[in-house]
Every structure is written in structure tokens, then in C-alpha cells.
Amino acid sequence: MAPHNSIKKGFSKLIKEDKLKLIASYFENPGEVITLLKSYWHSDKRQQQLFDEFSENTISNFFIPYGISPNVNINGKTYIVPMVIEESSVVAAASAAAKFWGERGGFHAQVIDTRKIGQVHFGWNGDKEQLQELFPKIKERLLADTAVMTEKMVKRGGGILDIQLIDFTAQIDDYYQLRIAFNTCNSMGANFINSVLEQFGHSLQNFFAEQIELPETLRKVEIIMTILSNNTPDCRVKVWVECPVNQLDGIDEHLSGAEYAQKFKKAVDIAHIDPYRATTHNKGIYNGIDAVVIATGNDFRAVEAAGHTYAARNGRYESLSSVSISNDIFRFELEVPMALGTVGGLTGLHPLAKKSLELLGNPTAPELMIIAATMGLANNFSAVRSLTTKGIQAGHMKMHLNNILNQLQASEEEKRKAREHFKEKTVSYAGVEKYLESLRK
Ligand code: MEV
């Protein structure tokens, strides 16, 4: 075990080999640690350099499985969906739901809007009515000063959609905000938005400096910060499945399809009234979404942060999905914000992200929003289905069996025997340990 020591200054200046040696020296067996971490380096030096340059202070790579959910039917089109996730059973759960709904009309999806938000937070100690009066001129100036930066995006059909001035002086003295809406087309747009916002900050300062008719104290604005908002409620997608309730016959051996639909609805309704359940329920949704977001080189923290804010939009943290049953039609729906890109950022740099997008047929950003949300609904369906029937552990632990066997350093022969043995039995760590002991005796 590495002791919890601190590292002396200058770590970032060391070359990679020396960083690795230094970190390894904190372990009891530095040689083994170096060999282990080096064994995860890419064999092609140029590829490894690419990965090293994604981040800082890199000493190795951290592998996460890259899986496939085949045959996901969305709006009549079939996708082979790449999923990067470490949790056993997520890909299997998504695939099972895709198969189930593929036989019932597939997934239906619609992009509601794609607008993203950026903010300029600033302080000005003048009169708010005067600021409102100046605002049309300010807006004009901001747009003029960023025209060169936005030209290409405008040509692609995007750019700045709207600029609003918001008065927060009742909460914080002199604090105002410019809230800017953007369309960033197929890019996630973080760099584009942040560059435009920083220019807005400079332009705002210049604008006020030039207002010579104002007293000198009012010719200054304090730019507190400029940054995009990860709250993207208007960059949102809706995905749903539906079928007559009798097509749910057989899911639960003791209930008719109509009865099961009611039970499923109750399970989802609980996540609407109880944040403890809602958090787990939504986590199951993000099992599917994050896996696609990561596989395509997008920012899963941004996507999750937006989703959780959206889940709390009614003043309480709630389920992102909902169920309705009307005229014997069961409908299960998910509505989520989803700021994704298919160009720019890591999407074109990470070799596997690039391949993921190719596998998906090089989708547009809105199409990728639909695919990722679909996998969220698929995972949510499978999770709630398991929870309301045989329970989650049966399937989960079957998938987890491999992990337990690996932890217990089972040989290939032992693994084969254990998989056979536990086919019809409940899997637990203690049970597997005991079984391996019996084999090894
Ligand atoms: C586990 O990763 C996800 C679930 O807990 C989701 C849920 O409870 O709905 C199974």
C-alpha cells in the first residue's frame, strides 16, 4: 500500500518515466507497479503520446470495457450502439430492452430543441433603467465584435440566437447577467461558446469605457466571469416506447400484461415522489446514457449535471422518465437534456470515439442525442423490469460472477466449472469462494 505522503513540488515538470518511478516508489513493490502500469501503455508510441496529451501528469491508461448493443431500432432505423462502461450487466440490460422493444415497434424519439446557454456575469453600479436603455446598443456592439468569430457557425446554420440582460441586483448588489443562447450545430460547442463569451466580456468593458457622457465611476464594469452553462434544458430530447398492455403479457408469470403495466407504472411513480428512489432510478438511466456519451468522446459530467438539474426543475428531485397507461396503451417516456457533439473535442481525436461515430453511421449531434437518450430509456426499462419481477441481483450477480472469479484468481477450467455450477444458483461472493475451495481441495 502506498503511504499517504505528499510529493515535493515540480512533479508536473518530470518526464513521464520519472513520474511513474516516483509514484511507484510509494508502493512496497515499485518494480511490480512500474511493470503493471507500463503494461497498459499503448504499444504504438504515437498513439500513446496522443493519450498522454489528452490530460496532464499521465503515467498510464485506465481501461474500461468497450461493448456493443446490437440492433437498437430508433424511429425505424437500426443502430449498432457502442457502450463504454465498467458495470457488468448494463450492456446486457440495454440489449435485452432493445430486443424487447424492437419487437414492439422500436423506440420513438424526437429532438425538442438544441439551444445552449452561455453567461457573462458582471457588476455595474449604475441605475438599472439606464442599463436597460443602453442594452440595445450593447447587444449591437457584442454582435459586431464577435461577427468574425461566429461567421463559420452562422454559415453552418448556427450562431448566437438571443442575448438577454438579467437583473440580479435584488440578490447580489450590482450584479447583472447576460444570458446568451447559442446554436452550435454538430459541435458540443464549449470552446466556441466560451471564446465568444470572453470576447463579450472585453466588448462590454470597452463599451462602457467609451460612454463619455456617463460619470467616470459608471464607465467601468466588473467582469466577474464568463462561462457556458451546463444547464441545457432547451437542448433536450424525448424518447418513448409504447404498446398495447397485452403485449406485456408474460413479463411477470403471476400478472397479466395489464396488471404488470400498473405495477411498472407504480415503480416509476415512486421515483416521482421520493428523491431517494429518484436518484437510483435516474442513475440507472445514466448507466445507458453515459456509456454512449463516453464511447463517442463526449463530456458525461456535463450531460449528467444537466440531467440532474432538469430532474429537479419542479422544486424536488424527480424521475426523468414517466409512464402513462391510457386506452390500454402502455407508454414509457424519457425526456432529458443532452448537450452532445459529433465534431470537435475528443470526438475526432480519440481513435475509438471516431470509430464509435462511424459505427453509428456518423450521426449529426441531434441524432446522437436521440441514440444516447434511447439507451438511457432502454437501461431504465430493464432495471425497473428486473426490480419489479425477479429482482436485480439474479441477473446482476450472474454478470458479476466473472468479476468474482477473477478476484479469486480462478483458472480458466475453474471459471468454466463455476459458470456451469452457478447457472441455476444464486451467485454470492461467499458462495463462489466456497465453491472454488471445494474444487481446489
Ligand atoms: C444499478 O447500476 C442501477 C439500478 O439501481 C437502477 C434502478 O434501481 O432503477 C438497477
Image (tube, rainbow, N blue to C red):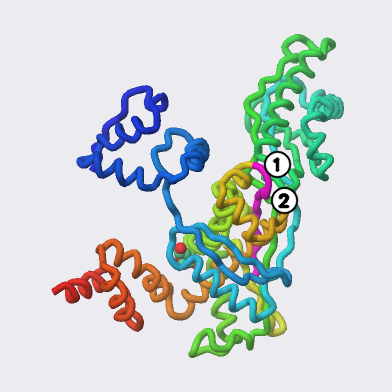
- Could you say where residue 217 lies in the image, as x and y percent from the top left? 72, 12
In this rendering, is residue 188 above or below 79?
Answer: above
| Three-letter residue code for mark 2 | Asp
Question: Residue drawn 73% across and 69% down?
Answer: 75
Q: Is mark 2 within 8 Å of ligand 1?
A: no
Q: Residue at horizontal 73%, vertical 72%? A: 76
Per the rendered image, the range of residues in magenta is 333-344
Q: Position of residue 239 (x, y in %)?
A: 68, 65
Cβ–Cβ under 8 Å for marks 1 and 2: yes
Q: Is mark 1 within 8 Å of ligand 1?
A: no
The C terminus lies in quadrant? bottom left
Q: Nearer the viewer, residue 310 or 414?
A: 414
Residue depicted at 49% across the width and 65% down the height: 90
For label 2, count other residues whose C-alpha is less than 10 Å away and answer few (under 14), some (14-19) or many (20+).
Answer: some
Q: Quadrant of residue 286?
A: bottom right
* Residue that carries the numbered disc 2 in the rendered image: 234
Amino acid under disc 1: Ile
Q: Secondary structure at mark 1?
A: strand
Say whether residue 394 is magenta.
no
Q: Nearer the viewer, residue 391 or 49?
A: 49
CA separation in Å, label 1 and label 2: 9 Å
**Is 366 on the left or on the right of 347, as rendered?**
right
Q: Which mark is residue 100?
A: none
**N-term mark: 1 or 2:** 1
Q: Which residue is mark 1?
A: 117
Determine the residue located farthest toward the left in the rendered image: 441
Q: 413 and 44: which one is in front?
A: 44
Name which residue lies at 43% across and 76% down. Answer: 391
Mark 1 crowd level (few <14, some 14–19, many ≥20, 10 Å Cα): many
Quarter of the image with the N terminus in it: top left
